[in-house]
Image (tube, helix red, strand yellow):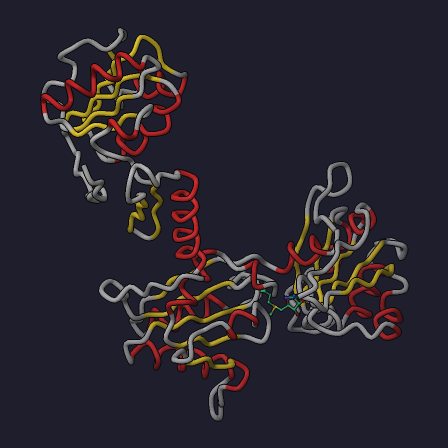
Amino acid sequence: MAEHPAYPVGLRLTGRRVVVLGGGQVAQRRLPALIAAGADIHLVSPEATPSVEAMADAGEITWTRRPYADGDLADAWYALIATGDTDANTRASAEAERHRVWCVRADDADAATAWTPATGTSEGVTVAVLTTSAKGRDPRHTAAIRDAVVEGLRDGTLVAPHHRTRTPGVALVGGGPGDPDLITVRGRRLLAEADVVIADRLGPRDLLAELPPHVEVIDAAKIPYGRFMAQEAINNALIEHAKQGKSVVRLKGGDPFVFGRGMEEAQALAEAGIACTVVPGISSSISVPGAAGIPVTHRGVAHEFTVVSGHVAPDDERSLVDWAALARLTGTLVVLMGVDKIGRIAETLVAHGKSPDTPVALVQEGTTAAQRRVDATLATVEETVVAQEVKPPAVIVIGEVVGVGPGTVEAPTE
Ligand SMILES: C[S@@+](CC[C@H](N)C(=O)[O-])C[C@H]1O[C@@H](n2cnc3c(N)ncnc32)[C@H](O)[C@@H]1O
């Protein structure tokens, strides 16, 4: 008989009797999906793995502790035959045939009337991959195709826009510190689905080059602000594009809520009645030191780390930072936006009791190909910044953790 391809179908098993014969590894792998499908699952097996036993204990399946016996498949809609006894499997699949129960045979795909596809899910869609014929069965290949599709959908390298369910609105996406691989899977997917992207100078700029030509990419720094403040002009641009029914991504460096003014944008959108999603990002305050071989905490060295903004000097009346209190802490101090004011910051910390020998590291353009690390102490940091021409963006780490690592971790080369 000519071999025809299997006919793919999705079984809706909620409340329907499914019989599983054998409580070993195959059952352990397949049962979670059957449970998730809401099937009424009956396991027949003299023994079971601890995980399968736990499913029975939790009431997710019922378990009859004996070998397969003729009649077990009566009234079943679907059967998984996976005992270690080939003879029992053969008898069970003959019974399935008699009762017209679709059955999967773990030990003999040819004898089965159904095959289990390699499956994965992404955003409410199940991807199921089947080989066309028993002869061509290659489970590793089908699993690899499943992985490629699911991972591609998750990370946005495979673009499948949601035509029906996509709603206009704004996603505030934390893009991570700069390396395009350090954005979240959700952020990358939203970027791939956007009509308009309003991007900061910091963050994964390389990802913008990958966007399809119809996507409008706007540099946030270049939005004209005339009678408004720059931030107000950005808020207005977000609102205007969303009002035109577009999917807008506001791509920000690091995390939107760490010195990112993300909440100001979320508030403005809420006031305008625009739907807003926030996607967290990997903040430079932790990841950039890490990329340069500096842990912000280390057992026996630092039990706390504090992230502060150094964009205004300690003696500036606008500063909200209690530098005297910070000087008394024994843990790590991470300063963002502090390159220009590092001299005054170091002086203030020393004036309030911090040792001038406290190690300091400046990590410029962390996680990018241009990453560089410059080391100093509180006493020398001001002159070092000038001598080494350290420029923003840089994360400044102050504390003993600077010395614990093996040194600079290599920056990416592309
Ligand atoms: C306006 S703040 C935004 C912080 C961002 N929201 C975050 O969570 O990383 C900008 C500052 O973050 C730091 N920064 C961001 N990305 C950086 C990078 N790749 N390398 C070094 N510093 C970075 C610098 O201190 C820079 O001045």
| Residue 244 placement (x, y as % from top left) | 29, 80
Residue 80, by quadrant, is: top left
Residue 135, by quadrant, is: top left
* Above/below status of 96 relative to 32: above
Of all residues, the one furthest to the front in this rendering is 1
At 69% from the left and 71% from the top, the residue drawn is: 393
Along the line of sight, which residue is nearer the eye, 272 or 372?
372
At 49% from the left and 56% from the top, the residue drawn is: 184
Q: Quadrant of ligand 1?
A: bottom right
Instruction: Decide if residue 324 is on the left or right side of residue 180.
Output: right
The N terminus lies in quadrant: top left
| Residue 220 placement (x, y as % from top left) | 51, 80
* Above/below status of 346 relative to 67: below
Label count reads 0
Along the line of sight, which residue is nearer the eye, 82 or 373?
82
* Above/below status of 356 relative to 249: above
Instruction: Decide if residue 384 is on the left or right side of residue 49.
Output: right
| Residue 319 placement (x, y as % from top left) | 66, 69
| Residue 384 placement (x, y as % from top left) | 87, 69
At 83% from the left and 49% from the top, the residue drawn is: 403
Along the line of sight, which residue is nearer the eye, 374 or 45?
45
The C terminus lies in quadrant: bottom right
Instruction: Decide if residue 266 is on the left or right side of residue 34.
Output: right
